[in-house]
Each structure stands twice: as structure tokens, then as C-alpha cells.
Image (spheres, helix red, strand yellow):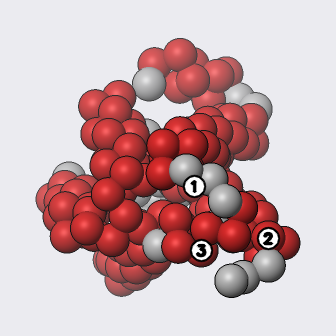
Amino acid sequence: MAHPIYAWGYLFGLLMAYGAVGWILAAYAAPLMMWMWTLLLIAYVAWADTGAIAGAMLWVVSVVWIAAYTTATPLLMHWKGPTWAISLVGVWIFAIGVVLLLAFARSAIQALGWSRQKTFYRLLMLTGAGLIIGRLLYVGSMLTPQAMALLYMT
């Protein structure tokens, strides 16, 4: 059995990873529906563990394909050509890693002795907090009137 300090470290890493997800979604001006579907996917993976990997990968691939089709770029970047393509590949690889991180969370934090239901709710709260923190960090880093309007638009 792993030491609880490793479990808490894993949870901190999960918070940081989902903070980055929130930052990326805000940077790409993801619509509200994408945020909602992402939250539903997080809940599904948090409950089903590794059994949800295939469905989660379908969502990740769909989002990347939508971004490629619409040539989405972060709001403050004007990337074109190879830089844009490399950024999408990087987001894709990162998203796969984040899904796997959440899918294996229950086994990584079992040293804390939480029940399945408590683990689910705590993972949901932690990842939701990470998404919110990431969004707030992104919006807070843009101190222009347009950026503040963006906060209220999306």
C-alpha cells in the first residue's frame, strides 16, 4: 500500500493538470457547451475509472478535430501553419495525459481509504476547482477591457 503523502501529491498534480485544462479552454474561447460536456466527461471518468478511457478519448479526439476544422487558436495568439498545427498536437497529447491521470486516480489515492462515492465527489470537486482556477488565471492575465468583456461573454 502506498504512503498517503503520495496520494496527496497525486491529488495536487491532478489539480494543477485540470487548472491547465481550464486555462486552455479559456484561451481557446471554448463555448459553454464544450465546458459542460467536459464537466460531464470528467464526472464519467471520475466514476468509471479506467472503464471510461475509450469514451474520454473519443471526446478528446472530437474536440481536437473541431479545433482543427475551425482553425481555432488561442485568443491572444495569431498562430498560422506549422506553429498552429504543433499547438494542436500538443493540446491533444496533453489532453490524453490528463484523461489518463484522472482514470487512474482511484488506484493512486486508495491509501487515503476513501469510499468509492467519497472519492468520486472529491475528484469531481477537485477537477472542477482546477477548471475554475485555470479560467480565472487566464482571464486575470488579460487586463484589457476586451478581456474583461470576454469573461462575461463565455
Pick the front one: 49 or 61:
49
Pick the front one: 122 or 96:
122
Disc 1 designates what residue?
A: 18
Identified by mark 1, the residue type is Tyr
Would you call the spot at circle 1 few (<14 residues within 10 Å), some (14-19), or many (20 or more)? many
Query: Marks 1 and 3, how far apart in space?
Result: 17 Å
Query: Marks 2 and 1, how far apart in space?
Result: 21 Å
Disc 3 designates what residue?
A: 108
The answer to whether residue 4 is left or right of residue 122 is right
First-in-chain label (2 vs 3): 2
Q: Quadrant of residue 88?
A: bottom left
Residue 136 is situated, as x and y percent measured from the top left of the image, at: 68, 35
Numbered circle sitting on residue 67:
none
Residue 109 is situated, as x and y percent measured from the top left of the image, at: 63, 67
Nearest to the eye among marks 2 and 1: give it.
2
Taking the spot 70% from the left edge, 29% from the top edge, the residue there is 144
Asked which secondary structure carries label 2, the reply is helix
Q: Do tag 2 and tag 1 residues touch (Cβ < 8 Å)?
A: no
Disc 2 designates what residue?
A: 4
Residue 117 higher or lower than 103, as above or below:
above
Would you call the spot at circle 3 few (<14 residues within 10 Å), some (14-19), or many (20 or more)? many
Taking the spot 53% from the left edge, 16% from the top edge, the residue there is 152
Query: Marks 2 and 3, how far apart in space?
Result: 10 Å
Identified by mark 3, the residue type is Ala
